[in-house]
Image: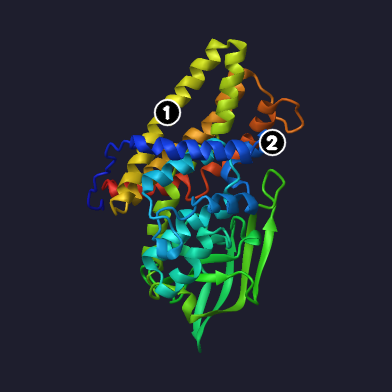
Amino acid sequence: MAGAVRTIELPLVTLPPGLEAIRGEVRAFIERELAAHPPERRAKSWLAFDPAFSRKVAERGWVGMTWPRRYGGGERSALERYVVLEELLAAGAPVAAHWTGDRQSGPMLLRFGTEAQRARFLPLLARGEIFFCIGMSEPDAGSDLAAIRTRARRVDGGWRVTGAKLWTSNAQRSDFMISLVRTEPPGPVKQQGLSQFIVDLKTPGIACRPIDDITGEPHFNEVVFDDAFLPDESLVGRPGDGWQQVTSELAFERSGPERFLSAFPLLVEAWSQAQRAGNAAALAQFGRLLAHLMTLRQMSISVAGLLQSGRDPAIEAALIKDLGMSFEQEVPRVVQAALGAVPTMAARDALSRMLAMVTLLAPSFSLRGGTREIMRGIIARSLGLR
């Protein structure tokens, strides 16, 4: 039976003119810090993990920008933060080290964490001194997040956790994980009985097993919990509230400019090559892509405005992610066809190396943060279609 219909809201939000000053600051910083950054590294965009670069970003006050000052934040607007993210992504900056903590773990702790958790972790995140990853997906659970089987049983002073997380990005390089686990036996509604914990990845009984991705780098991990002890203070929120918390957290993950700018450095390089060659047919195709990108950008800015107003735009975020991942997967196909480029990492020219990197990464664009099918299911339910 169809559910209640919810309107998808994407109000027109315009970036204030005053934000151009911070845009200039970020561009100057990027020009200085990434002068020697190789093209194929820029094509990897926000998946590239560089702790030293992330600490420099933090030193400029660009991590935790919207958080309260008492937790190390800058108390700046969501739109100011949006401009910083946009410029870093457009340049292909290696932001993966601080990305998860800044994008979702920090905001989640602000909303659901205890005062002690906020005071302990947020200032360290804002200074780039610790890095977070997220523990959601599991072996055999597919894209059904509610089907997780990692169990936490209560013991004196805390919890004992047994199970495994899979495809955990950068777990082997991170300090902490916010993990979703089952604290009660599954009942008729499998979304019930789930809880979130802050996990120190150095805890005895926890092992990270790196998994090479298609580029040959160990980006993913299997994280195994073998009766690992987590103290009571590691619980986020109340036991059993994990599903509500994690779905709220995913709104931060799904609506940002990283959902349509992952392939942007490749598109810029392709446009430049087509301009130099006077290739009008290729420029026309790239112009169509840029028109799509600008539409996605305006939708994403609208979500930033909703977040700024204190709204929870989970449905709008799912819509942007679905459209954005389709766009990102289209970019390398169009570039290759329009220019006749051959994607190879051994090429001398930057375009071929960038195209090779994005082509290898493109299949993951429709997986990370929730598959295409999951996004469309969320949207359909919100519209009362299922």
Residue 227 point in image, percent of width and height: 60, 79
Q: Read off the residue under disc 2.
A: 38
Q: Nearer the viewer, residue 359 or 31?
A: 31
Does residue 332 appear left or right of residue 235 in this picture?
right
Does residue 63 appear left or right of residue 6 in this picture?
right
Residue in the image at 65% along x and 76% along y: 205
Residue 92 visible somewhere in the drawing: no
Q: Read off the residue under disc 1.
A: 292
Q: How many marks?
A: 2
Q: Do callouts 1 and 2 mark residues in contact (Cβ within 8 Å)? A: no
Residue 166 point in image, percent of width and height: 59, 60
Q: Nearer the viewer, residue 139 or 36?
A: 36
**Dot placed on the residue nearer the N-terminal end, 1 or 2:** 2
What separation in Å lies between label 1 and label 2 (alpha carbons)?
A: 27 Å
- Local SS, label 2: loop
Q: Which mark is residue 3?
A: none
Quarter of the image for residue 288 reads top left
Q: How is the image coloured?
A: rainbow
Structural crowding at the residue carrying mark 1, measured as other residues with C-alpha within 10 Å and reported as few (<14), some (14–19) or many (≥20): some
Residue type, numbered disc 1: His
Q: Is residue 332 above or below residue 381?
A: above
Residue in the image at 29% along x and 49% along y: 382
Structural crowding at the residue carrying mark 2, measured as other residues with C-alpha within 10 Å and reported as few (<14), some (14–19) or many (≥20): few
- Local SS, label 1: helix
Q: Is residue 180 above or below residue 116?
A: above
Residue 61 visible somewhere in the drawing: yes
Residue type, numbered disc 2: Pro
Residue 210 point in image, percent of width and height: 69, 58
Residue in the image at 62% along x and 49% along y: 53
